[in-house]
């Protein structure tokens, strides 16, 4: 079974621009979560989508948004990029196992804002 | 209350030794405690997980010990190998994963 795929893998953008990142979950997984990973703040939860609806949201400004399509693929968008948005953005798809949602991560998109 | 505190920040172990990483939490609503392993340039990979109704879970060389009353859990890596050198994250979850700050493990031959 193919794992979680994320595109693009690397991205360089300029302050003020916007960016869209894409995630394809493991086949059959309906939940997709997004995380931001930085050396200073570690792994932080952005939001989760399930069946095209945002089910949960972290403490990030409204510049960060996402959506999920009917095939469970998800995109996240960051508008008006700031230098501090430079990070590894990780997508995880989930399956219910033993009463808990196991999350499986993709390789991430490395975003650099200059 | 949503924090998960992880220690140590870094760990150096000799090949064949035992690596121990500890985590503590405050929120008693957490009901799922996974550990992730991350190699440079890769996403975190689910290693092993435990629910609070179990005190210990073992998978191969990896064991989670869980102390509900102390609100602590730990990862033990037995017979540590150079290939185990990576960053390890504990996490706790109710409806979303809250991650610890990570432990960089280096195993020397």
Image (cartoon, coloured by chain):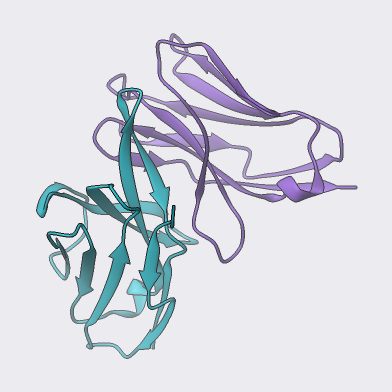
Chain colours: A cyan, B purple
Image quadrant where residue A3 sits: bottom left
Q: Which residue is drawn at 28% across and 52% down?
A: A33
Outermost residue toward the right in this view: B109
Left or right of B14? Residue A7 is left
Depth check, front residue: B33 or A73: A73
Left or right of B56? Residue A88 is left
Depth check, front residue: A71 or B11: A71
Q: Residue B51: x percent and y percent? A: 41, 20
Q: Which residue is drawn at 28% across and 47% down?
A: A29
Image quadrant where residue B4 sits: top left
Left or right of B104? Residue A103 is left
Image quadrant where residue A90 sits: bottom left
Q: Residue A97: x percent and y percent? A: 35, 29
- Quarter of the figure with the C terminus of chain A: bottom left
Is residue B14 positioned above or below B24 on the image? below
Q: Residue at x 47, y 41 (%)?
A: B100
Outermost residue toward the left in this view: A53
Is residue A2 positioned above or below B101 on the image? below
- Please give the count of numbered marks on the rendered protein: 0
Q: Residue A50: x percent and y percent? A: 16, 48
Is residue A79 positioned above or below A32 on the image? below
Q: Which residue is drawn at 40% across and 10% down?
A: B53
Outermost residue toward the front in this view: A1
Q: Residue A63: x percent and y percent? A: 16, 71
């Amino acid at each position: 079974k193919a794992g979680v795929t994320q595109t693009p893998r690397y991205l360089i953008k300029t302050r003020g621009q916007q960016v869209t990142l894409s995630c394809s979950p493991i086949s059959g997984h309906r939940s997709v979560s997004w995380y931001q990973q930085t050396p200073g703040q570690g792994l932080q939860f952005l939001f989760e989508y399930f069946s095209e609806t945002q089910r949960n949201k972290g403490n990030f400004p409204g510049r960060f948004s996402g959506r999920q399509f009917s095939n469970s693929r998800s995109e996240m968008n960051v508008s008006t990029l700031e230098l501090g948005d430079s990070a590894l953005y990780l997508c995880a798809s989930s399956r219910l196992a033993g009463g808990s949602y196991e999350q499986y991560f993709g390789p991430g998109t490395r975003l650099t804002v200059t | 209350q949503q924090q998960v505190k992880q220690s140590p920040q870094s760990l150096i172990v000799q090949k064949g030794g035992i690596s121990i990483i500890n985590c503590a939490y405050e929120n008693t609503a957490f009901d799922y405690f996974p550990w992730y392993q991350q190699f440079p340039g890769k996403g975190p990979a689910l290693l092993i997980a435990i629910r609070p109704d179990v005190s210990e879970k073992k998978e191969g060389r990896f064991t989670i010990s869980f102390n509900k009353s102390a609100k602590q859990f730990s990862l033990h890596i037995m017979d540590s190998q150079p290939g185990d050198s990576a960053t390890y994250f504990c996490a706790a979850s109710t409806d979303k994963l809250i991650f610890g700050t990570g432990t960089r493990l280096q195993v020397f031959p």
